[in-house]
Image: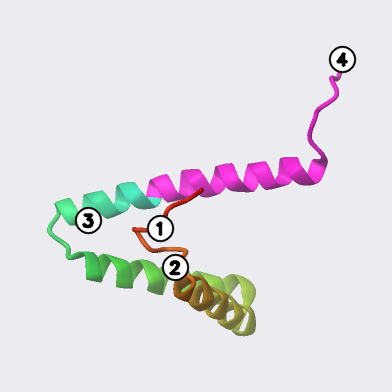
Amino acid sequence: MTYPTPHTPEELDDMIVQEKLQVALEFQHDAWAESTADGIEPEIIADAAMITAIRETVRVLGEDQAEALLESLRERILAGEFSPERVLQ
């Protein structure tokens, strides 16, 4: 027996992506905490994380799409999206 869902398939897909993102962020947070506990400076951890992310993005999407992603990240940084002082409403 199936039950109707109040969400469209697209909404469900978005919810799944957001849940996966949250889990991935938690994994990243744990790795960051473990690295700092081992005495690795935050700047080095950040550099390693970005290198890994960019390499994987280039591998999966190609250089042009990776460049477009980096440009969108630049715009989001300049807009303050990642600032610790940012207040979500």
- Indicate which label's residue lies in the foreground, 3 or 1: 1
The amino acid type, in three-letter code, at marker 4 is Met
Secondary structure beneath label 2? loop
The location of residue 18, given as percent across then percent down, is: 59, 46
The amino acid type, in three-letter code, at marker 3 is Ser
Q: Which mark is residue 35?
A: 3
Q: Which mark is residue 80?
A: 2
Q: CA distance from mark 1 to mark 4?
A: 46 Å
Q: State the residue position of label 4.
A: 1
Task: Decide if residue 4 is on the left or right side of residue 72.
Answer: right
Q: Is residue 5 above or below residue 75?
A: above
Q: Quadrant of residue 58?
A: bottom right
Q: Main secondary structure of the magenta part?
A: helix
For the N terminus, the quadrant is: top right
Q: Is residue 38 above or below residue 20?
A: below
Q: Which residues are magenta?
A: 1-27
Q: Earlier in the sequence, mark 3 or mark 2?
A: 3
